[in-house]
């Protein structure tokens, strides 16, 4: 299997600009474990007001990817997340336990596909999307599933986006080892372009953080 990443955009707390990402990839800078999120000033205030960290990060990297790459907005998008809207899900569960009810407005933005659905609306994407929860949180399995349309020839390229937000403090006793707020989006195809990075099985890690770091080192 040989695929090419032809464009990549990323967002994380404490990382600003291309040089910061290079320093992070080299181990010289750290992503901050904060619940800060991009401002999304390119969207309407009423649209972005209630969005979570994961949704804001997803909208931002999708916006950057399509704007900077000039990719056709009919391109299929695949969203991968290990935890989804975990902060909002926690609040919904807390309300259910304490008040024995769920507010429709809260529930509607807590589903697993919320971030990519909002990004599709914000960017007027028309190619459709898939949302993947990888088995046991293994990013490699999610990446392989996402790449299947390209490898099979069903799609010339896809836009792949990964995102996870900071896990709520209430889950302190169950925090995952890799609790890092981060989102990245990339164009994947079988065709090599300028500044492309080739992907094979050896480069696809179970960890999205390690995967991103290795990709950025080659850009």
Image: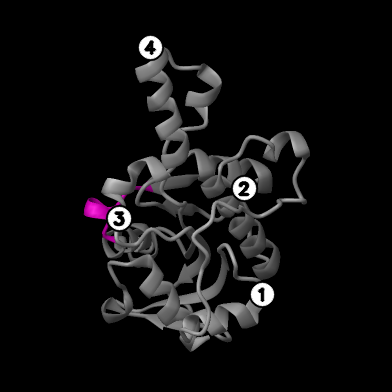
Mark closest to the chain's N terminus, 2 or 1: 1
For the residue pair 92 and 190, the one nearer the viewer reads as 92
Say which element carries label 4.
loop
Do residues under tags 4 and 3 come within 8 Å of each other at their CB atoms?
Answer: no
For the residue pair 38 and 131, the one nearer the viewer reads as 38
Q: CA distance from mark 1 to mark 3?
A: 27 Å
From the viewer's perspective, is residue 140 above or below residue 212?
above
Q: Position of residue 120 (x, y in %)?
A: 59, 45
Mark closest to the chain's N terminus, 4 or 3: 4
Mark closest to the chain's N terminus, 1 or 3: 1
Say which element carries label 1.
helix
Do residues under tags 1 and 4 come within 8 Å of each other at their CB atoms?
Answer: no
Residue indicated by mark 3:
176
Q: Is residue 17 on the magenta stretch?
A: no
From the viewer's perspective, is residue 126 above or below residue 148?
above
Residue indicated by mark 1:
17
Q: Position of residue 7 (x, y in %)?
A: 56, 73
Q: Is residue 3 visible?
A: yes
Range drawn in magenta: 132-138
2 vs 4, front mark: 4
Locate the N terminus by quadrant.
bottom left
Do residues under tags 2 and 4 come within 8 Å of each other at their CB atoms?
Answer: no
Mark closest to the chain's N terminus, 2 or 3: 2
Q: Position of residue 67 (x, y in %)?
A: 70, 63
2 vs 3, front mark: 3
């Amino acid at each position: 299997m040989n695929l090419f990443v032809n464009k990549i955009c990323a967002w994380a707390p404490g990382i600003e600009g291309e040089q910061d990402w290079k320093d992070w990839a080299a181990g010289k800078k750290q992503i901050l474990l904060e619940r800060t999120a991009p401002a999304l000033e390119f969207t309407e205030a009423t649209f972005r007001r209630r969005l979570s960290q994961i949704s804001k990060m997803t909208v931002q990297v999708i916006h950057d990817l399509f704007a900077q790459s000039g990719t056709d907005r009919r391109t299929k998008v695949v969203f991968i997340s290990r935890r989804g809207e975990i902060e909002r899900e926690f609040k919904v569960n807390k309300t259910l336990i304490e008040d024995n009810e769920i507010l429709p407005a809260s529930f509607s933005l807590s589903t697993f596909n919320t971030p990519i659905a909002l990004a599709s609306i914000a960017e007027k994407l028309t190619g459709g999307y898939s949302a993947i929860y990888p088995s046991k949180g293994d990013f490699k399995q999610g990446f392989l599933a996402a790449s299947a349309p390209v490898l099979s020839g069903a799609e010339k390229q896809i836009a792949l986006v990964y995102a996870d937000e900071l896990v709520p403090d209430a889950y302190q006793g169950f925090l995952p080892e890799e609790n890092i707020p981060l989102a990245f989006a990339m164009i994947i195809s079988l065709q090599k372009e300028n500044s492309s990075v080739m992907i094979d099985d050896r480069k696809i890690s179970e960890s999205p953080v390690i995967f991103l770091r290795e990709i950025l080192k080659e850009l």
